[in-house]
Image: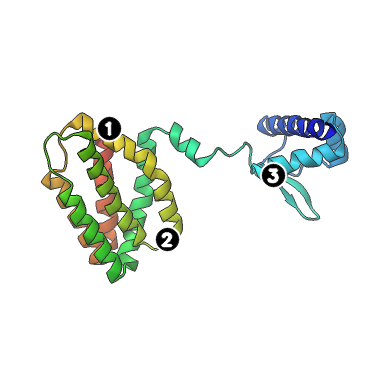
Amino acid sequence: MAQVIRETLADRAAQLLLDRIRSGEWALGEKLPGETTLAPQLGVGRSTVREAIRQLAGRGVLVTRQGAGVFVASLDVRDDWDEVLRRADILAVIETRTAIESEAAALAAARRTPADVRAIRKALAERDLSRPGGEQPRSLIEGHVDADLRFHRAVVSAAHNPVLQELFDALTPRLRQTMVDMLRIRGAYGDDADHDAHVRLADAVAGRDAAAAAALSRGHLAGVAEGLA
């Protein structure tokens, strides 16, 4: 029973500390007072202060430096990445995708291997087969969106940067549903101009033209953003 009470007090103390940090009482990078100072201010014991600090350190707000003390690492709790994407405006997601993919396309042009080019060409061919044109049922629209995302993922993968790959994959679920909904509203999709833009991107990566690959990626996604306006 005492353990439950101590944890509850620690939760409360952590929230009080977080409120004070949010209010600006301590600046980013500033050292917090010691446990003997914080304990009476928070109305708890030193062990509870230590537990509260551990909680906030686990949430990225505080950092403990051995022999130096406890410092403010963030002015608020970091949101879960999935929650951030759920709340984000889709245009913000596309802007983020543009930043990721344009850089990835340039890196892919510089780093791609023959196997990467084959994977990009294969994904491009599958994307081509998925674009029937005209008004289509949802299942075919979903198939086209999935084929499109596989193509763009193949380009990102050719950059050989695991961080860019992880960021692209994190954006994909949020983006996929929006693209499906957008194409349903449009009714028609997969015209020759759109396909040719993807062919040019694949050719730029294969031809090691980093500037063209980045520009083509950026231009394509600008068009996607305009379609959402």
**Residue 166 in the image, given as x and y percentages of width and height:** 44, 52
Labels 3 and 1: the sequence-earlier one: 3
Quarter of the picture holding the N terminus: top right
Q: Does residue 209 show up?
A: no
Tell me the SS state at disc 1: helix
Q: Give the label, 3 or 1, closer to the camera.
A: 1
Residue 13 higher or lower than 95, as above or below: above
Labels 1 and 2: the sequence-earlier one: 2
Q: Would you name the residue on which mark 1 appears?
A: 181
Mark 3, residues whose alpha carbon is within 10 Å: few (<14), some, or many (≥20)?
A: some
Q: Give the label, 1 or 2, closer to the camera.
A: 1
Mark 2, residues whose alpha carbon is within 10 Å: few (<14), some, or many (≥20)?
A: some
**What's the distance in space between the residues labelled 2 and 3, CA to CA?**
29 Å
**What's the distance in space between the residues labelled 1 and 2, CA to CA?**
30 Å
Front-lying residue, 143 or 183: 143
**Seen in the image, is 186 located left or right of residue 9?**
left
C-beta proximity under 8 Å, tags 2 and 3 = no
**Residue 213 in the image, given as x and y percentages of width and height:** 27, 57
Give the amino acid at mark 1.
Asp
Q: Would you name the residue on which mark 2 appears?
A: 161
Front-lying residue, 76 or 156: 156
Labels 2 and 3: the sequence-earlier one: 3
**Residue 131 in the image, given as x and y percentages of width and height:** 16, 45
Residue 102 higher or lower than 85, as above or below: below
**Residue 17 in the image, given as x and y percentages of width and height:** 73, 33
Q: Residue at position x 78%, y 40% from top?
A: 51
Give the amino acid at mark 2.
Asn
Q: Would you name the residue on which mark 3 appears?
A: 57
Q: Does residue 114 show up?
A: yes
Quarter of the picture holding the C terminus: top left
